[in-house]
Image (tube, rainbow, N blue to C red):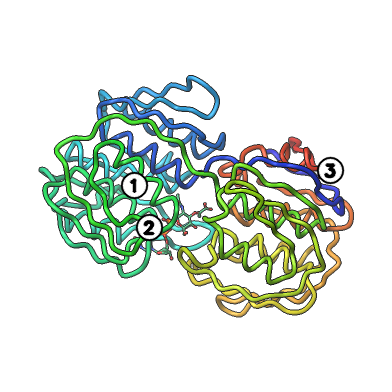
Amino acid sequence: MDKFRIIGKRPLEGRVRVSGAKNAALPCMAAALLTSETVILHNLPYVRDIITMRRLIEDMGGLVLMPEQRTLKIKADPIQFFEAPYELVKTMRASVLALGPLVARFGQASVSLPGGCAIGQRPIDFHLMGLTKLGAKIELVGGNVVAKADRLQGADVYFDQVTVTGTENLMMAAALAKGRTVLHNAASEPEVVDLAVLLNRMGARIMGAGTATMTIEGVERLNGAEHTIIPDRIETGTLLAAAAATKGNLEITDCCPDHLTAVIDKFRETGLMIEQISDVALRVEYAPLNAADITTQPFPAFPTDMQAQYLAVMTQAEGSAVVTETIFENRFMHVSEMLRMGAHITLRGNQAIVRGHSQLTGANIQASDLRASASLVLAGLAAEGETVIDRVYHIDRGYERIEEKLRSLGAQMERFRG
Ligand code: EPU
């Protein structure tokens, strides 16, 4: 299994390009299942989850070509198997994004029910409730969600809680339903908006994406389209955190600062100097950091996907920060590993109280999920001596060649088999 070895305490300096957003790319790839025509996607990040989604589409019978790096041409025709098997769903929960498109276009789908994962139980009951409202008949058969429908019918769908992939699944299903669907308490994340842009290019009629109420007028059929995936706001935030944790200075390019206003504002509050140098570029310069509290919330508030990385930075700030996680019930797996590196963190329910500044020291530690892995890399970069991180396959799911990017900025970091 691959591991990372990091020798810490080297300030990161230089310019770095942000990749495309994994969490926008995955639903956009699933959207290609809605049409028999070709969907071309550019700026896909080269990460494991994209390879898994590609395999899922190919296993169904779809044709996926890569004419150039970071571009995929997807032709979901003919689709012969309407299934996302356990083998794939267990490695990537986002496989559930196949459910809405398959049931809408073919009237049938079987998707293995994802189990709990490292960060929480993560049920998909809102997805199923919404599809049922649109007229799908859903049964659980041998651990699989089996959905059947004649043509879906538009309906009013109320989400009890904001769900990103739940909203995306319903947008895709409603795009081909008969009549009007209104999604209430819909997710407004930039990735949801990116999907709406692609779907509208494919001929869908989606209004209100980016707000809590989305209206979708169903159409008979969708066509092919070409689309460029938005920059990854979480990678951008992780790079800001890397500059903060290593006392570095970075220019971060090909990003979209408007998508991470809450993160930028919070880092500024800690003292980090962040200048927006263009619509797509940021300059970040280290300045001594003071602790500041955060609470994770749906967009546009501070994202749960940046909580672990922010917590790593808070170990290096003066004073105490309260980090409150409201989205996932078990998203503090990184804390026990940071304690082994000398951090002062107390866990109380859904809050972590971080007392800084701590002199972290390198240790052998284990990654537990994607964003936790990123936070451990940051802790390793800030620590004195050598850190070895095991199970880095978690980080490969969502960060494109992170060790190469960080090395190009002066980090002493290598991947090895061990
Ligand atoms: N929830 C339910 N029932 C549902 C759906 C969600 O109870 O049917 C709960 C979840 O358990 C959670 C909350 O609602 O407590 C929000 O979950 P959401 O559905 O929004 O999460 P998701 O769609 O499964 C996406 C991202 C996650 C990101 C969350 C929150 C993708 C592929 N994944 O997950 O990204 O943390 O939204 O923003 O878009 C990551 O990239 O590391 C990652 C975990």
Whole-percent x and y of residue 163? 38, 61
Amino acid type assigned to the residue bearing label 1 in the image: Ala
Whole-percent x and y of residue 150? 10, 43
Q: Give how far apart the Cα atoms at labels 1 and 3 are.
A: 40 Å
- What residue would you read off at disc 1? 196
* Residue 276 position (above or below residue 266): above
First-in-chain label (1 vs 3): 1
First-in-chain label (2 vs 1): 1
Q: Is residue 182 left or right of residue 196?
A: left
Residue at x 68% of width, y 75% of height: 292
Q: Are marks 2 and 1 in contact (CB under 8 Å)?
A: yes
- Residue 210's disc is 2
- Which element is circle 3 on? strand
- What residue would you read off at disc 3? 412
Residue at x 63% of width, y 55% of height: 237
Res 240 quadrant in image: bottom right
